[in-house]
Amino acid sequence: MRIDELWLEGFRNYDIQHLTFDRDCNVIYGENAQGKTNLLEAIVYLSCGKSPRTHSDRELIGFDRDFASLSGQIHSRDRDFKTELRLVRGQRRRMSVNGVSVKTNAALSDVLHTVFFAPEDLFLIRDGAAARRRFMDLSLCQLRPRYAEALAEYHRLYEHKTRILRDSEEFPHLLDTLPDFNGRLCQVGAVLIHYRARFCRALAEHAAQAHAECSGGRETLALSYETVRTVADPLAELPALTAALEEHQRTHYDAEIASRLCLSGPHKDDLLVEVNGRSARQYCSQGQVRTAALALKLAEREIHKNTFGEYPVMLLDDVLSELDPRRQEYVLNRIAGGQIFITCCENDRLDALVSGKVFHIREGKVI
């Protein structure tokens, strides 16, 4: 799986740019704030219709521009694809694959998969639960098209329910519609838990191995998936998960009305990380936290490989400079095979990696 060519117009700080990539290694260097990360962001966006840096598509359109367009020539599953997206201010975005209009992010994920690793991901363990949910969601949206559809529907239902609760004091009749939203939220929420639990089980297996290797066998990593308390077994079948969510919803109904907040559902799920039996978030050193985060990202890559039979495109955004030499060497040894993009500053030395193409970025242009 690889991206061979990329066309950008009006995306972030890129005016008009066309790039042709090496099938193995691509190094992108330049000073800060020149557009290196924007380039990787564009590749991620082509793969799943979501940005790893913002929730708003409007922010992807360059200043003083009315639209942005992205196109990628992609080789996947022994076939060639061309994915195109067009963002226009005040309008719905348009997406197509091989000239055929598509409506969902799942259609993009069916073509290209990416694993994006940024410096802030090194502190994924110490961040709040929202960061780890986003980590799961971004990966699962590429792995499972049904998950991407369910997640989009859950977000829509959640927003509607939140508005109903917020406005219910002024308009009490809105509460008449709440049972319908609650019922559907439980059904869709069960789908999210179903896929998250299985993803976390596979992640735990691969991450434990990666962490043991990176730590020289001195530490053990354990992961567990945490969802609403009425779900005794997150790996249960969908009817059981739906029933458990309905029970949780019933017990929180009065509290939701009183607080006018949505308190029940998998939108508060978390991925718990332990090193040597202790909470990594609370008790681990900075080095241990970074090792655990590395293990999660490398495990994610292995899950993609095992699911689809080919490695996803690996995107390392200025992350090597944040690691000590031993961890740098470990990461580089583990990413052999598959296409890789690495961004770095001009003074970084990556001589061992420069076996493909090197791009110098300045002010949104390749020079």
Image (tube, rainbow, N blue to C red):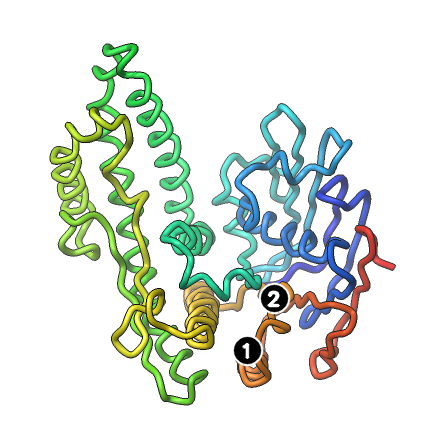
| Vertical arrangement, residue 129 with respect to residue 326, above or below | above
Per the image, label 2 sits on a secondary structure element best described as: strand
Which of the pair 30/237 is nearer the observer? 30
Q: Is residue 238 left or right of residue 348?
A: left
Whether residue 311 is situated above or below residue 255 in the rendered picture: below
Q: Is residue 51 above or below residue 338?
A: above
Question: Residue 293: which disc?
Answer: none
- Name the residue that disc number 2 marks: 316
Report whether residue 77 is seen: no
Q: Which residue is drawn at 53% across and 61% down?
A: 115
Q: Residue at x 36, y 88 (%)?
A: 218
Kind of residue at disc 2: Leu
| Left or right of residue 238: residue 36 | right
* Identity, as a three-letter code, of the amino acid under mark 1: Val
* Dots 1, 2 in contact, CB < 8 A: yes
Which residue is tagged 1?
331
